[in-house]
Amino acid sequence: MKIIKKLTSFVILLVLVLGFVYLYQKYIGSNLSDIGIDTSRNEYNNSSDNYYINFAALIIVVPIIEELLYRLGLKLSVRNITFLILGALYTIFLFIYPKNLNYNNPKILLTFFSSIIIVYFIMKYFVKRNYEHISLIYARKFKMIFVVSVIVFAYSHFTLYENYNTFHNLIYSPIILFPYFVAGTLYGLIRIRFGFVWGCLAHMIWNFIALTI
């Protein structure tokens, strides 16, 4: 009975938020270009050779990674906090890394993942040394931490848009990224109320609907 109640609450919450975002996209988001807001997105290679691989990655792999980076840290532990810091650093990296890097190059790919692992353990050591102080911050400022996690998650998607680094787009970024702010809030609430796995499931369902509608 408890799992049925949890599942029902989960479905209702997800349907309500998805419905709200759908209406926003239909009546507002799709018309932003009419008022001079550029919502053009970068094009990616979706040839038949890699379409299904990319689709599976966006439905399964990406949600799990993003939930690890942006929502795991909403529950207090050394590991969880480390992932949240890593997520913030990754978002910054998306804005500053050279765009001509070729990740098909094994050396660059190895360097990238090696750097992530090294940074993770450095941050974990830092969190361990300051865990008591960080725990007090969580106790006193958790709402702020939650809001920051939503903002960082939303802006991790800003580089998906063309000309994201222009002043004009930066000014209008809260409007452009509004669906991601809503999504980040939803996943965070689900993470806190239902658990990490449920947050991943909601994220997977959202991505599936976004790619198929």
Image (cartoon, rainbow, N blue to C red):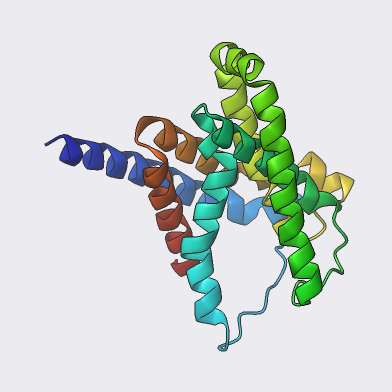
Quadrant for the C terminus, please. Answer: bottom left
Q: Can residue 140 be seen in the rendering of this structure? A: yes
**Coordinates of residue 193 in the picture (x, y in percent):** 37, 30
* 13 and 77: which is toward the camera: 77
Count of picture labels: 0
Quadrant for the N terminus, please. Answer: top left
- Judged left or right of residue 115, residue 212 is left
Position of 77 relative to 92 (above/below): above
The residue sitting at the left extreme is: 1
**Coordinates of residue 6 in the picture (x, y in percent):** 24, 37
Choose top left, top right, bottom left or bottom right for residue 191. top left
Q: Which residue lies at the image location 71% right of the left edge and 56% below the top edge?
A: 33
Q: Which residue lies at the image location 57% right of the left edge and 18% below the top edge?
A: 138
Position of 207 relative to 184 (above/below): below
Q: Can residue 161 be seen in the rendering of this structure? A: no
Q: Which residue lies at the image location 40% right of the left edge and 37% below the top edge?
A: 190
Choose top left, top right, bottom left or bottom right for residue 195. top left
**Coordinates of residue 35 in the picture (x, y in percent):** 73, 49
* 20 and 103: which is toward the camera: 103
Q: Which residue lies at the image location 88% right of the left edge and 45% below the top edge?
A: 167
**Coordinates of residue 47 in the picture (x, y in percent):** 61, 86
- Judged left or right of residue 22, residue 110 is right
- Judged left or right of residue 42, residue 205 is left
